[in-house]
Image: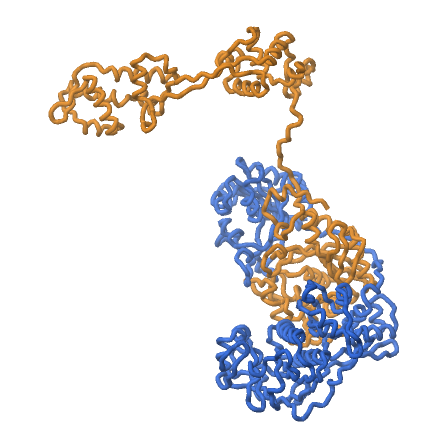
Chain colours: A orange, B blue
């Protein structure tokens, strides 16, 4: 064994214990108390050092001895402050004798802090000793003799109170008293307790002996656990020994500050969109049916506007107004097409229904608002909008979720530039090289496209839907250039990136999961 | 939108039009063809040949059946739709349907025809029933605007009458029952009566279809008679009727059924419906009827929208193979939809059909060339900055639902009856757990804290996100604002620990703030402050009241703050 390597790995406390065996001949046995004195260590330090040395097999246990030790219970401490029941009964009997009053057992039992069992036990003991007599009428009389029990208990209380004592150090009669008045199973109400104390004695193992010898012979450079500013300042680190660490130990865990992995994912999408020239739009969580649906040319009888698809606000139920000229123009578009070149849906549009407040059910509502607020032409816009659907919550349906949506306005917008833009999304957002365009249906676009892409990891998946806004949508809102409306379905990509299979886990309350998800995108 | 079952064998038979042999088709071929009908194959049972197909277009009810899908593909193969001869055919004088008075207020319109010579097969019957259900349910708004009945023609004697009767005046054995019932009994007892009876709520007289012998055919839109209105495999003479509240929709629905039965080989005979008063289509309405009108569209419109020069000839051909009736003009096309469609509202609808007919793959994608500048909204920039700072301060970001429960957002926060407890609530909540929008952020973070007592401490959490703050002065009754909420939880969590973080945050926001003591029920009294910037209260910081922690079953002290970033950004 490499002794110097061993010596280097020793903790200062271990060194102290090893050197405490000192010059004693090999094989010397030392008890804990001797060791503590020789090594000048606190009991807690000593016991740590002993455990370490035992674990390293530098020290061995020579013998274990068990000694009974007497100490005071809480009750004993109280008796020490005041008096034991025997003493109180004895004193009371003495007092009665000097005053000539009568004293009965019930009188004693009525005294504060004396309960019936204490009284009977004390009276019995004193009577047996001949210290008390019970005379006619149940009266107690003192005979005038001293009580060995009372004296012994008082002595013992005083002695043991100072510190716990080895039971064998007491005389036989005192040991008997301790026996009689010690806590036992079934009798916890006693002043004394007797516990077994295990004391160990130690001897050095051969390696320990070699190490101790080495330490004595060579001496130890002073060991330093921490390099301090002082050591650096006065240069005293020179000639010091720095304690070696067990490098292979696991690092203690720390908490970190970190973005939410799903938000990180959305942030990368956001950054991509901005880099492609898209301006962010914001909207309101609460919307009118007008902006959520009417402005998007969804007829008021459309099945997706049903009470089972959209959340309606309880109070207030309606918006105070819908801005003109949009209300009038959208009404006409629905009823007969207005000036949009459409036949319209041919029904009586309900302007009051348009004001009904709902929780935004589609991100396209944000786009509709943007169209009505003089957007830039050419212009590109996006929003990552929280939307709400009246759906039974399960692994694939959440009540609230993000929709990534937007619009592109421009003179050069047409079906082919729509496909070109989708190609760009496929490449930039999903890193996909293969794209399929399928005919699709959305109430507010014509033509409409569904885009499927081959994702590098997920294979073929639907990435999003898009189309050219119907003129019935754009013209009433004052926009007379073609407009692309697009939406990306990114939740599946996000779930795979986060390694989850349940959409509800995107908003999980499991802090451990959030902290440990790496979220590699 | 509807998902339907079709059977491959039946589908192949329908694809093989007269004079063409039936051919087995591959699933891949079916999937490709489905692009023509905006359909997606959802499932395929190789054993039974059942294909589950989802149809997307809610304006194309003609496609919600095997016949319609096959027809769209067949036209493409044949190059043109072979016109259905029964449209415009004069009805036989013996086949009339007479409408009684008063129905304007109940269920005004009816359309009907007969179909002979097609012996109903098992698959054909399944399709008839499925089409009937899907059209009445989705296109007909759960039978409110349109419902359909199909009967054994041999048991019916013309003229058929459609009229109002007293609820106890008529009785018959409805489908699914063994005994004769009056109309009011049907409404009270029959499952269909219970399901759809509300459509007739408040009516003192109810619609009834009867034949010349006074035999009830059905009680629209509730249920058919079992005697007459139960079609079986092997029947080869049918009577089909559609009733409803919207005449064009009623006629269109009948047109679809007539075309479907004709595709299966039936000879369709129109019926003249005689109304007591004039309707938008006159007093005597022959059904089925082609309601389509030709529409002239500039070639330029189509070419501009598609971004590709096509020429009149190509456009004409594309539309014809998609079922349109087209004549070409100079720089224009005059296009008319086939009679089983009514979804032409705008020229753009035709544009899309040109694209679908040619196939989206025919169009080469090009990038929009015009330059635009991208950027984030001001509030998003503020929020991102706050998030960066919070991460730097050692906080873990959280994202939560915004829709939650009043118990979490209000009661558990000790805010019942206070201004702080006002929220946007939902009228038609499915469950209390998802019935209101959060009005502040801290309950969202406590939700995580409450679930994470086993996660390594300390917990330092934050979320920047939207809340809805009720505001009666706002036209929507509430404002959507972005707030930043944050909490620290561990055995020794202390006000000053978080106060230091707020300090750092405002330093980098470049705003001076002060803390004014506030009595906020969620926090311990004397340990909560209002965060005030430029005289405006922008948030709150404090140690949570033990009762709040108890309500959330959180066993460590928690300090938290919240700042309204929208309002902070507005201060400029």
Q: How many marks?
A: 0
Q: Is residue A487 visible?
A: yes
Taking the image as shown, residue B570 lies to the left or right of residue B77, namely left
The quarter of the rendered structure image containing the N terminus of chain B is: bottom right
Taking the image as shown, residue A76 lies to the left or right of residue A515, namely left
Taking the image as shown, residue B442 lies to the left or right of residue B547, namely right
The image shows residue B36, relative to residue B295, as above or below, that is above
Q: Image quarter for residue A486?
A: bottom right
Q: Is residue B140 visible?
A: no
Depth check, front residue: A165 or B515: A165
Q: Residue at x 71, y 82 (%)?
A: B266
Q: Residue at x 69, y 71 (%)?
A: B64
The image shows residue B490, relative to residue B470, as above or below, that is above
The image shows residue A455, relative to residue A311, as above or below, that is above
Whole-percent x, y for residue B79 in the image: 83, 75
Whole-percent x, y for residue A201 in the image: 49, 14
Whole-percent x, y for residue A367 in the image: 71, 61
Q: Residue at x 88, y 78 (%)?
A: B330
Depth check, front residue: B66 or A7: B66
Whole-percent x, y for residue A286 in the image: 61, 60
Q: Image quarter for residue A191?
A: top left
The image shows residue A229, relative to residue B443, as above or below, that is above
Taking the image as shown, residue B38 lies to the left or right of residue B140, namely right
């Amino acid at each position: 064994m490499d002794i110097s390597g061993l010596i280097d790995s020793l903790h200062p406390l271990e060194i102290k214990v090893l050197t405490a065996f000192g010059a004693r001949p090999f094989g010397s046995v030392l008890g804990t108390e001797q060791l503590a004195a020789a090594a000048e260590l606190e009991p807690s330090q000593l016991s740590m050092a002993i455990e370490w040395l035992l674990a390293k097999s530098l020290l061995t246990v020579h013998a274990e001895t068990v000694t009974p030790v007497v100490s005071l219970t809480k009750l004993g401490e109280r008796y020490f402050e005041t008096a034991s029941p025997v003493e109180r009964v004895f004193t009371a009997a003495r007092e009665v004798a000097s005053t000539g009053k009568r004293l009965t057992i019930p009188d004693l039992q009525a005294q504060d802090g004396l309960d019936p069992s204490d009284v009977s036990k004390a009276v019995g003991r004193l009577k047996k000793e001949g210290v008390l007599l019970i005379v006619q009428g149940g009266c107690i009389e003192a005979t005038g003799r001293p009580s060995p029990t009372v004296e012994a208990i008082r002595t013992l209380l005083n002695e043991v109170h100072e510190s716990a004592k080895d039971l064998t150090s007491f005389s036989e009669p005192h040991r008997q008293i301790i026996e009689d008045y010690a806590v036992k199973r079934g009798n916890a109400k006693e002043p004394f307790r007797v516990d077994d104390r295990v004391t160990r004695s130690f001897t050095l193992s051969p390696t320990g002996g070699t190490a101790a010898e080495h330490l004595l012979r060579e001496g130890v450079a002073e060991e330093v656990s921490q390099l301090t500013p002082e050591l650096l300042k006065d240069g005293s680190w020179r000639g010091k020994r720095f304690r070696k660490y067990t490098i292979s130990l696991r690092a203690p865990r720390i908490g970190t500050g970190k973005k939410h992995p799903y938000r990180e994912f959305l942030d990368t999408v956001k950054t991509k969109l901005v880099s492609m020239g898209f301006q962010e739009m914001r909207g309101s969580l609460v919307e009118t049916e007008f902006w959520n649906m009417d402005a998007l040319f969804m007829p008021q009888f459309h099945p997706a506007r049903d009470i089972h698809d959209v959340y309606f606000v309880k109070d207030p139920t309606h918006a105070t107004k819908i801005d003109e000229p949009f209300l009038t123009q959208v009404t006409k578009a629905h009823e007969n097409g207005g000036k949009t070149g459409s036949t319209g849906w041919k029904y009586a549009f309900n302007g009051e229904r348009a004001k009904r407040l709902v929780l935004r059910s589609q991100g396209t509502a944000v786009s509709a608002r943007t169209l009505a607020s003089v957007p830039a032409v050419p212009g590109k816009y996006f929003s990552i909008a929280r939307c709400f659907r009246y759906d039974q919550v399960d692994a694939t349906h959440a009540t609230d979720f993000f929709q990534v949506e937007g619009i592109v306005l421009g003179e050069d917008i047409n079906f082919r530039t729509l496909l070109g833009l989708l190609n760009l999304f496929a490449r930039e957002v999903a890193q996909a090289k293969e794209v399929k365009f399928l005919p699709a249906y959305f109430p507010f676009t014509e033509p409409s496209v569904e885009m499927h892409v081959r994702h590098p990891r997920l294979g073929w998946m639907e990435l999003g839907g898009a189309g050219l806004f119907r003129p019935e949508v754009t013209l009433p809102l004052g926009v007379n250039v073609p407009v692309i409306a697009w939406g990306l379905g990114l939740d599946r990509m996000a779930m795979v990136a986060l390694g989850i299979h349940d959409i509800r886990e995107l908003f999980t309350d499991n802090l451990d999961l959030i902290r440990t998800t790496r979220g590699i995108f | 939108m509807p998902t339907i079952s079709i059977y491959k064998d039946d589908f192949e038979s329908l694809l093989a039009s007269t004079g063409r042999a039936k051919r087995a088709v591959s699933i891949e071929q079916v999937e490709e063809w489905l692009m023509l009908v905006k359909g997606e194959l959802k499932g395929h049972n190789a054993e039974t040949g059942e294909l589950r197909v989802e149809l997307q277009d809610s304006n194309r009810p003609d496609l919600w059946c095997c016949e319609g899908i096959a027809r769209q593909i067949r036209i493409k193969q044949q190059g043109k739709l072979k016109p259905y001869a029964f449209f415009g055919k004069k009805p036989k004088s013996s086949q009339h349907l007479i409408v009684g008075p008063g129905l304007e207020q109940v269920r005004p319109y009816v359309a009907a025809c007969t179909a002979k010579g097609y012996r109903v097969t098992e698959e054909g019957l399944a399709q008839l029933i499925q089409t009937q259900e899907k059209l009445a349910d989705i296109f007909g708004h759960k039978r409110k605007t349109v419902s359909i009945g199909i009967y054994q023609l041999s048991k019916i004697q013309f003229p058929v009458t459609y009229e109002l009767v007293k609820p106890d005046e008529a009785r018959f054995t409805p489908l699914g029952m063994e005994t004769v019932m009056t109309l009011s009994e049907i409404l009270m007892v029959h499952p269909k009566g219970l399901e759809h009876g509300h459509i007739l709520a408040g009516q003192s007289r109810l619609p009834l279809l009867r034949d010349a012998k006074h035999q009830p055919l059905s009680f629209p839109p509730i249920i058919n008679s079992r005697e007459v209105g139960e079609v079986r495999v092997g029947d080869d003479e049918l009577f089909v009727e559609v009733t409803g509240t919207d005449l064009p929709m009623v006629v269109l629905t009948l047109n679809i059924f007539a075309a479907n039965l004709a595709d299966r080989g039936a000879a369709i005979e129109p019926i003249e419906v005689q109304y007591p008063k004039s309707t938008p289509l006159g007093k005597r309405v022959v059904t089925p009827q082609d309601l389509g009108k030709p529409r002239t569209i500039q070639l330029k419109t189509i070419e501009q929208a598609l971004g590709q020069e096509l020429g009149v000839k190509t456009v004409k051909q594309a539309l014809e193979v998609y079922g349109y009736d087209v004549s070409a003009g100079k720089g224009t096309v005059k296009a008319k939809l086939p009679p089983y469609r009514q979804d032409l509202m705008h020229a753009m609808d035709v544009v899309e059909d040109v694209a679908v007919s040619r196939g989206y793959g025919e169009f080469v994608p090009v990038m929009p060339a015009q330059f635009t500048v991208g950027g984030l909204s001001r509030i998003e920039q503020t929020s991102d900055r706050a998030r960066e700072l919070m991460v730097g301060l050692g906080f873990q970001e959280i994202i939560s639902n915004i829709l939650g429960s009043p118990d979490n957002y209000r009661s558990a926060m000790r805010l019942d009856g206070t201004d702080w407890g006002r929220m946007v609530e939902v009228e038609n909540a499915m469950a209390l757990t998802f019935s209101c929008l959060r009005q502040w952020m801290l309950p969202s973070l406590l939700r995580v804290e409450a679930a994470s007592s086993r996660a390594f401490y300390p917990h330092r959490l934050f979320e920047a996100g939207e809340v809805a703050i009720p505001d009666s002065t706002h036209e929507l009754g509430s404002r959507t604002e972005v707030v930043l909420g944050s909490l620290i939880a561990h055995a020794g969590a202390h006000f000053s620990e978080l106060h230091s973080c707020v300090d750092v945050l405002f330093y980098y926001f470049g705003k001076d703030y002060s803390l004014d003591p506030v009595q906020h029920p969620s926090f311990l009294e004397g340990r909560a402050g209002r965060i005030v910037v430029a005289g405006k209260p922008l948030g709150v910081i404090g140690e949570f009241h033990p009762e709040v922690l108890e309500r959330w079953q959180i066993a460590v002290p928690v300090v938290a703050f919240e700042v309204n970033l929208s309002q902070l950004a507005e201060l400029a």
